[in-house]
Amino acid sequence: MELKDKNILVVGLARTGVAVVRFLVQHGARVTVTDMKGEAELASCVSALAGLPVTYELGRHEEPSFRTADLIVVSPGVPMDIPPLKVARQAKRRIISEIELAAAFISAPLVGITGTNGKTTTTTLIGEILRNSGFATFVGGNIGTPLIELAASGEPVDRAVVELSSFQLEGIEQFRPKVSVLLNITEDHLDRYASYQEYIDAKGRLFMNQTAEDYAVLTMDDPLVAAFAERISARTVPTSQQRELPYGVFCTTDEMVCRLGGGELRIPLAECRLKGSHNRENMMAAVAATLLLGATDEGVRRTLAEFRGLPHRMELVRELNGIGWYEDSKATNVGSVVKSLESFPGNITLIAGGKDKGGDYAPLAGLVEERVSHLILIGEAAERIDGALGRLTNTYRAGTLAEAVALAHELTRPGGTVLFSPACSSFDMFRDYEDRARQFVALVRGLEGGASC
């Protein structure tokens, strides 16, 4: 990809946008940055680019810049259907994501991971297995460190592991992972997509440039994921918790079995630190992807025995008076909450709600009726969730998270579980899901009686 002396427009100036600008300037491009946020809101980003020859169009989008750019690089948080990008397409301008730009300058084999839930855990696990197998490994993408930072650094790595959101995949053209991983698909981001099918199609773009020389790790227990096996060119590597596989990775009641053409690896589940069906799904995908890229059996075993999981996903905050309090703020969609509720047999007080993402709450109905004793709702989505689930159990509304925690403390009996698993994004009441998590943890640790874990 030739960048020198090209007029390149970067749309969106958050962490990824800053990294893209630096990379483009480093390669001799003439860079303009546009963002609907004003200079005051973006002061830290502008400061990070001080001294670089950059033109800023902040607080607005100037259509002429979109019409005349040689290349437009879109940051992940920017919808691909905003009016200025439609203008650019009409003018036949080239529009790509940061992932597409970065991959053109990276020679290491790429592992691309997507899915509605479990991406971050699986991505991190893949990175740890590869490192424990002796490979110099980059881990980034949607997980935190933009892939473009690897391209800019020039750092030699053996493997690159990239978490990919549907938003990032919308802007790829030639991006081709050696190993792709699709974990699951449930309704999400319907506040951004016109239909569920559009969201499914965005996920499927992960496979579009793969050939028979590449691999696609697919969770066959998810029918939407399994359906891709019939229409992609990559070699399918299946995983399952429901049936034995002659080829692939599957779980029995007691162990994980890996059959990838080079013998058989068996790992007792009792030796794996991560627990729960959702984590078995993540572990199977991670093991398949890494073994395909040369990971050692020892690297796999060691990582699964040591890996504790990630913050804000089913974390036990404390046990108080015989009640476990769990923080699951990263559960921002219904599919994720389904997995969380499946982790407990019953007597659950569920705190849920936040900014509605347009999905259907009905998939929670059976579990709520069977396992949730009390449902406490907060945020903008409270009314919609109440309409879908409120009749199935004892349901309450709380004006703030503090009120919800106090109410859960009052209602939950010893032997029960309080689960904060919102099924919604955080932006109605909090800065982000991490801010929401911190506030919940502080409130729970402030409850009187007992000792924190």
Image (tube, rainbow, N blue to C red):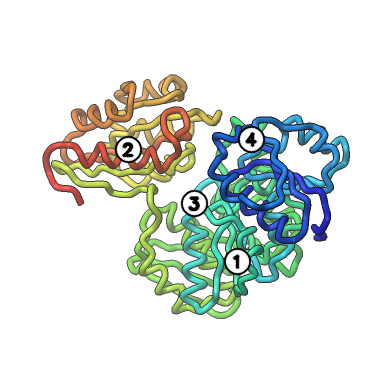
Residue 26, position as x, y percentages in the image: 71, 60
Q: Is residue 253 left or right of residue 258?
A: left
Q: Residue at x 23, y 29 (%)?
A: 406
Mark 3 and mark 1 lie on one chain; the one further toward the N terminus is: 3
Residue 218 visible from this viewpoint: no
Mark 4 and mark 1 lie on one chain; the one further toward the N terminus is: 1
Label 3 residue SS: loop
Q: Which residue is mark 4?
A: 196
Question: Residue type at mark 4?
Answer: Tyr
Tell me the distance, in whole angstroms, between the alpha carbons under discs 2 and 1: 34 Å
Corner quadrant of residue 212: bottom right
Label 4 residue SS: helix
Labelled pair 2, 1 in contact (Cβ < 8 Å): no
Q: Nearer the viewer, mark 4 or mark 1?
A: 1
Q: In the rendered view, tell whether residue 373 sits above or below residue 47.
A: above
Badge 4 crowding class, 10 Å Cα cut-off, few under 14, some 14 to 19, many 20 or more, is: some
Labelled pair 4, 1 in contact (Cβ < 8 Å): no
Mark 4 and mark 2 lie on one chain; the one further toward the N terminus is: 4
